[in-house]
Image: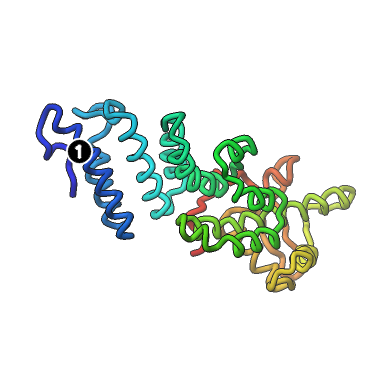
Amino acid sequence: MLNIHSFGGGQKRYAALEVANTLFRVTFRLKNLRLADSIMKGVSHNLSADSATPFQTFPTSQQVTYKFFEGRIAIFNELYPAAAEALSYACNHCHKDAGPQKMRILQFLIPVQMLLGKLPSAAIRHKYNMHIYDTIIEAVRSGDVQTFQQELDGNMHTFCVQGTFFLLEKLKLTVLRRLLMRCCILHLEANAADANPHHFPLDNFAKALQWQQQMDADFEGATMIVANLIHLKYVKGYISQAHRKLVLNRKGSNVIGMAFPALDTVDVSKIGM
């Protein structure tokens, strides 16, 4: 395990981060992320503000490289808020003329932010030529499951080479959640005068899945999807099997806001378990 203190005192310690970054490059090329994680643990506790070598005292280029790999390792460990923080640091401190490096950072930062409910602006995507995410982002925003799956399948090779395919695949549940939310909004608007407008018929969601040409587009399939969303806390409510309905959490006047919490409050690491 790499330890900065093993480099002795003085300027020698400042070579440690460059050595660590070189080891990260090697371990990632060898696809040995567990070893990279071990190296990260050996270095990180020696970079705090009160240590002999605070992180901010290292050259900015080394900081950016280190934070990039820290974000990649956090993705591997499914620690998405930590990954977003590290990658954002790398992106914000990357030199303004280092376009290719910033694009590489954004290839991972954009999917992580989408998992946490933050969609990047069109200006950012245009500036750094991240148009490969344009259709996926629109599908996430609109709940278009069919387009999302087509785009993911059509760019599978590119995303696999980038190392972002499985990260993007986790977004499907976010798209399904958005589709369900839109269905619930329409139901609430159409049944506002009813005694229980927050009781949403699951058959309606099944019809929406049929419209999106999904394989599990029947009542049982729709129920399983909703049950998974509730289990992951993407949706707050419960399923009434007897009435074939999703009963949304209605604490307060904002039913949708309560039933569909912000994604950055959800533990997205459990997706796919």
Q: Residue 267 location in percent, x, y? A: 50, 51
Rendered image coloring scheme: rainbow
Q: Residue 153 location in percent, x, y? A: 60, 64
Q: Residue 41 location in percent, x, y? A: 26, 46
Residue 68 seen by the camera: yes
Please name the residue shown 20% across and 32% down the image: 14
Please name the residue shown 63% across and 35% down the image: 123
Q: Residue furthest left?
A: 8
Q: Is residue 74 left or right of residue 268?
A: left
Look at label 1 and name its amino acid.
Answer: Ala
Closer to the camera, 219 or 124? Answer: 124
Closer to the camera, 142 or 58? Answer: 58
Q: Is residue 176 above or below residue 106?
A: below
Q: Residue 16 location in percent, x, y? A: 20, 38
Q: Is residue 19 left or right of residue 145?
A: left
Closer to the camera, 206 or 106? Answer: 106
Please name the residue shown 58% across and 55% down the image: 171
Please name the residue shown 18% across and 50% down the image: 1
Callout count: 1
Task: Determine which residue is flagged by label 1.
Answer: 16
Q: In terms of image quadrants, where is residue 215?
A: bottom right
Q: In terms of image quadrants, where is residue 210?
A: bottom right
Q: Is residue 232 above or below residue 102?
A: below
User: What is the secondary structure assignment of the residue under circle 1?
Assistant: helix
Residue 265 seen by the camera: no
Callout 1 crowding tier (Cα within 10 Å): few <14, some 14–19, many ≥20 = some
